[in-house]
């Protein structure tokens, strides 16, 4: 009796495509970011691979512990890599941000990374963006009174 029930359940799983979903698991490879510079956007990348076509890759982040996470759609940058950024103005006033990455394929299968925390630090002088001032505009040349050479060039 048990063998018949198990065989029937197995046949239902195979016929419904469940076995294919098990065989086509998604994998996310991501190196956590140890720190970020205060005042700069936080850009994260991940490699997502699977046998099925990817539907979406999403970055979820929370600014405070136990807060509902925000989400950012990650964009393909080629060769199975996906990139997502958290804008600098969103990160102002916090000492750290927590995030995880989720991928979903076209069959609905989901996988996600664990939560990671990134702490912010002040940029060192060598890491600060340098504003380059435009050089002053040149002053126009005007002929001096009594200079015949310049007067001839100006008069034609």
Image: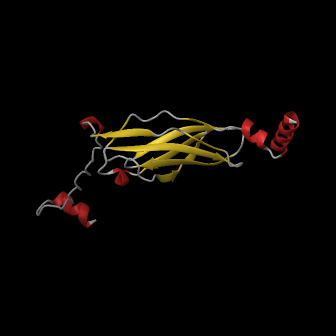
Q: Residue at x 86, y 37 (%)?
A: 7
Q: Nearer the viewer, residue 31 or 69?
A: 69
Left or right, residue 119 beside residue 31: left
Direction from residue 133 to residue 115 in the image, left or right: right
Q: Nearer the viewer, residue 154 or 39?
A: 39
Relative depth, front residue between 8 and 75: 8
Residue 54, horizontal then vertical, whole percent: 66, 46
Name the residue: 83% across, 37% down.
6
For this orientation, the residue located farthest to the left is 146
Q: Give the x, y percent position of residue 84.
A: 49, 47
x, y percent for residue 87: 40, 52
The quadrant in which residue 148 appears is bottom left
Question: Which colour style is shown?
Answer: secondary structure
Image x and y of residue 92, in percent: 31, 51
Locate residue 80: give its quadrant.
top right
Location of the C terminus by quadrant is bottom left
Q: Nearer the viewer, residue 18 or 41?
A: 18
Q: Residue furthest bottom?
A: 155
Q: Is residue 43 above or below residue 137?
A: above
Please name the residue shown 46% across and 52% down the image: 69
Count of residue discs: 0
Q: Quadrant of the N terminus?
A: top right
């Amino acid at each position: 009796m048990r063998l018949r029930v198990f065989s029937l359940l197995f046949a239902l799983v195979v016929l419904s495509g469940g076995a294919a979903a098990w065989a086509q698991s998604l994998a996310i490879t991501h190196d956590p970011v140890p720190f970020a510079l205060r005042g700069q956007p936080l850009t994260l990348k991940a490699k997502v691979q699977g046998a099925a076509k990817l539907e979406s890759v999403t970055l979820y982040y929370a600014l405070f512990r136990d807060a509902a996470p925000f989400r950012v759609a990650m964009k393909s940058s080629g060769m199975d890599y996906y990139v997502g950024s958290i804008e600098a103005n969103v990160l102002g006033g916090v000492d750290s941000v927590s995030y995880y990455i989720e991928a979903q394929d076209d069959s609905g299968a989901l996988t996600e990374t664990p939560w990671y925390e990134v702490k912010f630090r002040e940029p060192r002088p060598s890491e600060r963006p340098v504003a380059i001032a435009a050089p002053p505009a040149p002053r126009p040349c005007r002929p001096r009174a009594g200079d015949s050479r310049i007067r001839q060039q100006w008069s034609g």
